[in-house]
Amino acid sequence: MTYVLTENERAELLPDLGATGWGAVPERDALRKIWKFRTFSEAWGFMSRVALAAEKLNHHPEWTNIYNVVDVTLTTHACDGLSRLDLDLARRMDKIAGDAAEVQRNHSEPVECLCRLQHMRDGG
């Protein structure tokens, strides 16, 4: 079974993802990142490689592609929030993208707010 990340796990694991451009989605327990590639072909190639990784994890992103931009949101529907599956897929996506794309960093809240969101969800 997949579980929502604990507050301690969030505090330990999310800052590294935040440093790579992942951000918190307002009003959701989810991560978001936007990559801008040089061409549509590069964006599509990235998505194809991510699709294979997602299939291996049996965990799939919410994403859109408009020309050379890939906008990704990760959350685990089975547990209604962030899980280790999201973190694993985020790291794989970062590795696949490498330095081939510009990361859009002004799209969401700082990733650290996900610790506060979880605390609030837990009644704190």
Image (cartoon, rainbow, N blue to C red):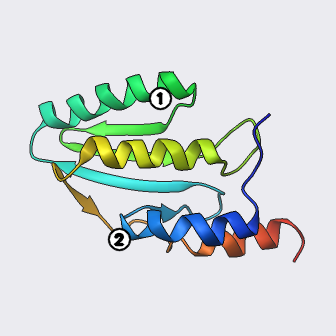
SS for tag 1?
helix
Residue 30: image location, x then y, percent: 59, 54
Residue 78: image location, x then y, percent: 74, 35
What is the quadrant of the N terminus in the image?
Answer: top right
Residue pushed farthest right?
Answer: 123
Residue 9: image location, x then y, percent: 68, 63
Dot 1 crowding, Cα within 10 Å, few <14, some 14–19, many 20+: some
What is the quadrant of the C terminus in the image?
Answer: bottom right
Residue located at (66% from left, 57% from top): 29
Q: Nearer the viewer, mark 1 or mark 2?
A: 1
Tell me which label, 1 or 2, sits earlier in the chain.
Answer: 1
- State the mark number for residue 96: none
Left or right placement of residue 33 versus residue 39 in this view: right
Q: Quadrant of residue 10?
A: bottom right
- State the mark number for residue 106: 2
Position of 9 relative to 120 (above/below): above
SS for tag 2?
loop
Q: Which residue is mark 1?
A: 54
Does the image show residue 111? Answer: yes
Left or right placement of residue 51 versus residue 55 in this view: left
Residue located at (69% from left, 38% from top): 77
Left or right placement of residue 4 versus residue 56 in this view: right
Residue located at (82% from left, 65% from top): 121
Q: Amino acid at mark 2?
A: Asn
Q: Quadrant of residue 24?
A: bottom right
Q: Amino acid at mark 1?
A: Ala
Left or right placement of residue 1 versus residue 71 in this view: right
Residue located at (49% from left, 47% from top): 73
Position of 72 relative to 104 (above/below): above
